[in-house]
């Protein structure tokens, strides 16, 4: 995933939390905020220290980015998505994470399907 497709600034995270809509399942919380001026969706990731050490948190972030890379054509453009990982994610592999993420994105109607 290209760096310009990531939400990095705290101000952008806060805007998504305040103005965006949230959807959740047991593993993830997703905030989606429409941004009509954007050509491509952007994602911001938040993985708490409660989930594990730095190695585990970075692994979860890599899995989420890879899942989005594989679903890139299915996700609506013009969105900022903030993904917050919850505790059960620590015990999951890539395919389980992708399945759970797909589920919560379908709930939020972010996928084209």
Image (cartoon, rainbow, N blue to C red):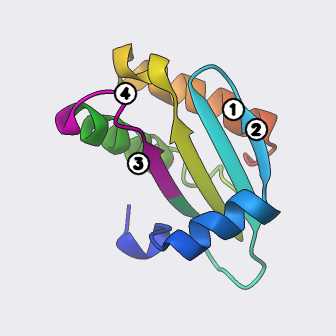
The N terminus, quarter of image: bottom left
Q: Position of residue 34 (x, y in %)?
A: 78, 68
Mark before the other along the chain sequence, 3 or 4 = 4
Q: Does the magenta stretch include residue 46?
A: yes
Residue lying furthest front = 50
From this viewpoint, which residue is outermost toward the bottom? Answer: 37
| 28 in relation to 96, above or below | below
Circle 2 Cα neighbour tier, 10 Å, few/some/many (<14 / 14–19 / ≥20)? some
Using a 10 Å C-alpha cutoff, classify the residue at mark 4 as few (fewer than 14 neighbours), some (14 to 19) or many (20 or more): some
Residue drawn at x 69%, y 63% is 16
Residue 64 visible within the image: yes
Residue 113 percent across, percent down from the top left? 77, 40
In 3D space, how far apart are the residues under numbered discs 2 and 3 (Cα atoms)? 19 Å
Sequence-wise first label, 4 or 1: 4
Q: Which residue, given by chain and number where applicable, does mark 1 sit on?
A: 104
Q: Mark 3 points at which residue?
A: 65
What percent of the width, then of the height, locates residue 6?
Answer: 46, 67
Between the C-alphas of marks 3 and 1, the distance is: 15 Å
- Can you tell which of label 2 and label 1 is closer to the viewer? 2
Give yes or no for contact between labels 2 and 1 (Cβ–Cβ under 8 Å): yes
Point out which mark residue 38 bears. none
Q: Nearer the viewer, residue 47 or 109?
A: 47
Q: Residue placed farthest to the left in the image?
A: 55
Disc 4 target residue: 51
Q: Is residue 41 visible?
A: no
Neighbor class of circle 3 (other Cα within 10 Å; few <14, some 14-19, many 20+) is: some
Q: Looking at the image, which is closer to me, 52 or 90?
A: 52
In this rendered view, identify the residue nearer to me: 50 or 82.
50
Which residue does the image show at 34% across and 36% down from the upper left?
49
Question: Residue at left 77%, top 45%?
Answer: 22
Instruction: Using the image, tell me which numbered label, if any, was put on residue 23.
Output: 2
């Amino acid at each position: 995933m290209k760096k310009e497709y990531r939400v990095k600034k705290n101000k952008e995270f806060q805007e998504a939390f305040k103005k965006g809509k949230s959807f959740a399942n047991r593993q993830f919380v997703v905030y989606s905020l429409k941004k009509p001026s954007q050509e491509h969706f952007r994602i911001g990731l938040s993985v708490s220290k409660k989930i594990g050490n730095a190695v585990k948190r970075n692994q979860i972030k890599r899995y989420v980015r890879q899942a989005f890379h594989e679903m890139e054509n299915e996700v609506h453009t013009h969105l900022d998505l903030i993904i917050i990982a919850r505790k059960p994610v620590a015990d999951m592999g890539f395919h389980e994470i992708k399945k759970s993420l797909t589920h919560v994105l379908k709930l939020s109607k972010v996928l084209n399907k």
